[in-house]
């Protein structure tokens, strides 16, 4: 058990050393914050640390996830949508890259482009006359 605790302390120290604010959120999880972005890092026994979900961005004090409508991206929080600004999107993308780098994940092509969203809410088939 001491091995898991020291590994947890080490990963928390790595995040803190690179400017992240680290908060405990459970025995096998913690939350990291930086640049108005937040992510929960967790692991199951015997598995490596990994993000529990997509990173979120704080808009007006609300933790929002990135939502894609095909024509535009929005911040989404419990049914509310906020238009996204380019700088906010770049900030979220940079935050996600830093978290993935510290966890030792490979950088995948589509993630490097910043093209992944927590929610996709469009269907190119809806509204067609043949349906």
Image (spheres, rainbow, N blue to C red):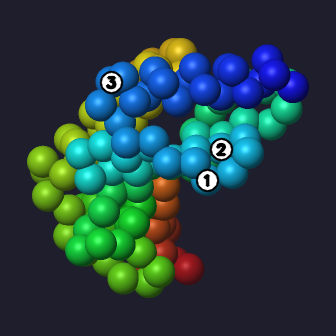
- Residue 91 picture location, percent across and down: 22, 42
Q: State which tag comes first along the sequence, 3 or 1.
A: 3
Q: How far, Cα to Cα, is label 3 from label 1?
A: 20 Å
Q: On the image, numbered disc 2 is attached to which residue?
A: 29
Displayed quadrant of residue 66: bottom left
- Residue 38 picture location, percent across and down: 40, 50
Count numbered badges in the picture. Answer: 3
* Circle 1 Cα neighbour tier, 10 Å, few/some/many (<14 / 14–19 / ≥20): few
Task: Tell me the SS state at disc 2.
Answer: strand
Task: Mark 1 and mark 2 in contact? Answer it, CB < 8 Å.
Answer: yes
In this rendering, does residue 105 appear at all?
Answer: no
- Residue 122 picture location, percent across and down: 44, 67
Task: Tell me the SS state at disc 1.
Answer: strand
Asked if residue 19 is positioned above or below residue 30 in the image, the reply reads above
> In the image, which disc is placed on residue 18?
3
Q: How far, Cα to Cα, is label 3 from label 2?
A: 18 Å
Q: Going by the image, does 118 lie left or right of 91?
A: right
Displayed quadrant of residue 103: top right
109 or 8, which is in the foreground?
Answer: 8
Asked if residue 97 is positioned above or below residue 66 in the image, the reply reads above
Q: On the image, numbered disc 1 is attached to which residue?
A: 25
Residue furthest front in the image: 2
Q: State which tag comes first along the sequence, 3 or 2.
A: 3
* Circle 3 Cα neighbour tier, 10 Å, few/some/many (<14 / 14–19 / ≥20): few
In this rendering, does residue 4 appear at all?
Answer: yes
Q: Quadrant of the N terminus?
A: top right
27 or 105, which is in the foreground?
Answer: 27
Q: Residue at x 48, y 55 (%)?
A: 118
Q: Quadrant of the C terminus?
A: bottom right
Q: Residue at x 41, y 61 (%)?
A: 65
Q: Going by the image, does 46 lie left or right of 70?
A: right
128 or 63, which is in the foreground?
Answer: 63
């Amino acid at each position: 058990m001491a091995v898991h605790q020291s590994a947890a302390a080490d990963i928390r120290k790595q995040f803190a050393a690179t400017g992240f604010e680290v908060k405990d959120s459970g025995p096998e999880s913690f939350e990291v914050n930086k640049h108005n972005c937040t992510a929960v890092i967790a692991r199951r026994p015997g598995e490596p640390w990994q993000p529990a979900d997509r990173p979120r961005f704080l808009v007006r004090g609300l933790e929002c996830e990135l939502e894609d409508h095909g024509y535009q991206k929005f911040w989404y929080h419990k049914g509310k949508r906020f238009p996204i600004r380019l700088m906010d999107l770049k900030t979220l993308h940079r935050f996600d890259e830093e978290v993935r780098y510290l966890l030792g994940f490979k950088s995948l092509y589509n993630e490097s482009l910043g093209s992944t969203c927590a929610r996709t809410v469009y269907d190119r088939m809806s509204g067609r006359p043949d349906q």
